[in-house]
Image (cartoon, grey):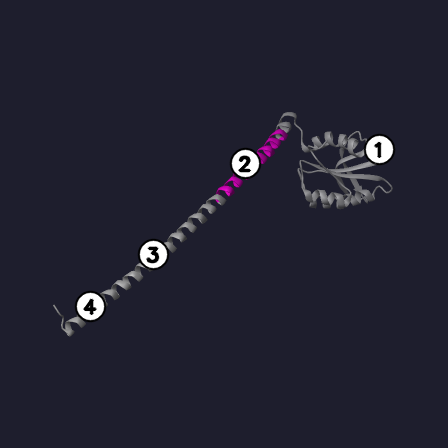
Amino acid sequence: MSLSPEVYETVVRIVDQRVGEIKVTREDFDKLVRTVSELSTAVRELAEAQKRTEERIGSLASAVEVLAKAQEETRGGLTDLRVAVGSLTDTVGFSLEDVAKVVVPGWLQRHENIHVETLERRHIPIDHKYMIQVNLYGEGAKNSEKVIILGEFKSRIFGGDVESFVMNMRDVERQMPGRKFLKLLFGFYVHPTAQEAAKKHDVRVIASYQR
């Protein structure tokens, strides 16, 4: 059976249209495949990134746990120290001043080769106008040379405490010209700033646990 030219052209046109539709569909399909592939890659990279993040979080959590444990142990140690000191105070009736009077003479003997029998409170008259109280006053000797001990006790010693103490003791030293002095502060806690100030002014800072 032969087709008329008009029918043939119609058939060709319809076939071309269908082929064109198939081509478009194929391109869309290829595009969809590429999109899915790209999406799959992105998901895989995201999963790997999440895994690395979880590992970092795990490491950080472990570090925080270790730090917290160390902090707890430190806090526990400080608590034990406070309890021990408090127990000593409650049981024996010792004040910080009493502890200083017991500990400081031995420390001076071992570290400064200064022998002093006792330490006491003393009020020093300044130019007959006023008096300065010295909390820990003692008259000792180092290699047969007399040494005056001028001391103060505070629970917590900071750099500012050292500076104030040095200024207060200047008037006391001025009242005893030609004498040799050793100045010191005694306390339960000595801050690093106190150590620096003490070195600057040639002052001894002694913590209660030092021997």
Residue 124 placement (x, y as % from top left): 79, 39
Q: Is residue 136 visible?
A: yes
- The local secondary structure at tag 3 comes to helix
Q: Which of marks 4 and 1 is nearer the N terminus?
A: 4
Q: How far, Cα to Cα, is label 4 from label 2?
A: 81 Å
Please report the bounds of the magenta region as a residue range.
57-85
Q: Which of marks 2 and 1 is nearer the N terminus?
A: 2
Residue highlighted by disc 2 = 69
Residue highlighted by disc 3 = 33
Residue 99 vertical placement versus 172 (above, below):
above
Q: Nearer the viewer, residue 93 or 36?
A: 36
Mark 4 or mark 2, whichever is nearer to me: 4
Name the residue at 60% across, 33% down: 77
Q: Which of marks 3 and 4 is nearer the N terminus?
A: 4
Q: Which of marks 4 and 2 is nearer the N terminus?
A: 4
Residue highlighted by disc 4 = 14
Please say if the residues under marks 4 and 2 sit with CB atoms less than 8 Å apart: no
Residue highlighted by disc 1 = 141
Which three-letter amino acid code belongs to the residue tagged 3? Answer: Val
Residue 104 placement (x, y as % from top left): 74, 32
Q: How far, Cα to Cα, is label 3 from label 4?
A: 29 Å
Residue 143 placement (x, y as % from top left): 86, 33
Q: Quadrant of residue 180?
A: top right
Residue 191 placement (x, y as % from top left): 67, 41
Which three-letter amino acid code belongs to the residue tagged 4? Answer: Ile
Q: Earlier in the sequence, mark 3 or mark 2?
A: 3
